[in-house]
């Protein structure tokens, strides 16, 4: 008895094509490169490092390294200046300090916010690369004309996480 194979259905063909694109990429289809802003950055003081990573189609950043993760009392640094009383006991290590950064037509990332735990305030922010190892962080309150520019330096990818140091001192 001879078996006759049926031609693949449109559904099967679509799944096969989707699997090929996911696995190997489609011919002629450019794979979007990760934005160069992604990575580890020392803040302007050099006493902290922020990991910038994708959050959906936007960028966000969290504190992942602190030169001194514990205070003079031997306890982990806390977000004591946060305007929300319920958040003042959270440790500085791990908090989100950049959020909602969207790609702009000028090549920068903007329309986001930056949080400064040293004063407990959030500002509008725009970031852009000055060069491969320098990130320009422009923070402003409402009016873009009046703001402050900070420069962050790229940090090595092997920085020890402040999470482990914070847990050890709790």
Image: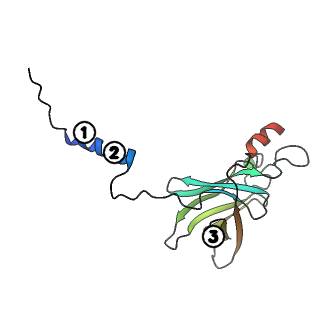
Q: Residue at x 66, y 62 (%)?
A: 114
101 above or below 167? below
Q: CA distance from mark 1 to mark 3?
A: 47 Å
Q: Secondary structure at mark 2?
A: helix
Which residue is depicted at the point 71% across and 69% down? 150
At mark 3, the secondary structure is: strand
Residue 111: percent from left, percent from top: 56, 66
Looking at marks 1 and 2 on the same chain, the residue that comes earlier in the sequence is marked by 1
Residue 138: mark in rendering: none
Between 84 and 151, the one lying in front of the other is 151
N-terminal-most mark, 1 or 3:
1
Label count reads 3
Which label was assigned to residue 20? 2
Q: Nearer the viewer, residue 97 or 88?
A: 97
Name the residue that disc number 1 marks. 12
Q: Secondary structure at mark 1?
A: helix
- Picture coordinates of residue 76 (x, y %)? 82, 45
At 59% from the left edge and 57% from the top edge, which residue is drawn? 38
| C-alpha distance separating marks 1 and 2 | 12 Å
Report the residue marked by disc 3.
131
The mark that comes first in sequence, 3 or 2, is: 2
């Amino acid at each position: 008895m001879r078996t006759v194979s049926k031609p693949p259905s449109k559904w099967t063909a679509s799944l096969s094509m989707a699997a090929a694109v996911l696995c190997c990429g489609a011919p002629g289809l450019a794979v979007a490169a990760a934005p160069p802003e992604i990575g580890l950055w020392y803040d302007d003081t050099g006493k902290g490092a922020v990991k910038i990573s994708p959050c959906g189609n936007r960028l966000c950043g969290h504190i992942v390294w602190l030169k001194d993760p514990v205070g003079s009392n031997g306890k982990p640094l806390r977000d004591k200046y946060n305007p929300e009383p319920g958040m003042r006991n959270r440790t500085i290590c791990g908090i989100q300090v950049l959020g909602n950064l969207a790609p702009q037509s000028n090549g920068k990332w903007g329309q986001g916010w930056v949080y400064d735990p040293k004063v407990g305030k959030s500002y509008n922010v725009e970031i852009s690369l000055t060069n491969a190892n320098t990130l320009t962080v422009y923070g402003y309150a409402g009016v873009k004309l009046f703001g402050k520019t900070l420069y962050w330096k790229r940090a090595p990818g092997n920085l020890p996480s402040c999470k482990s140091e914070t847990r050890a001192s709790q």
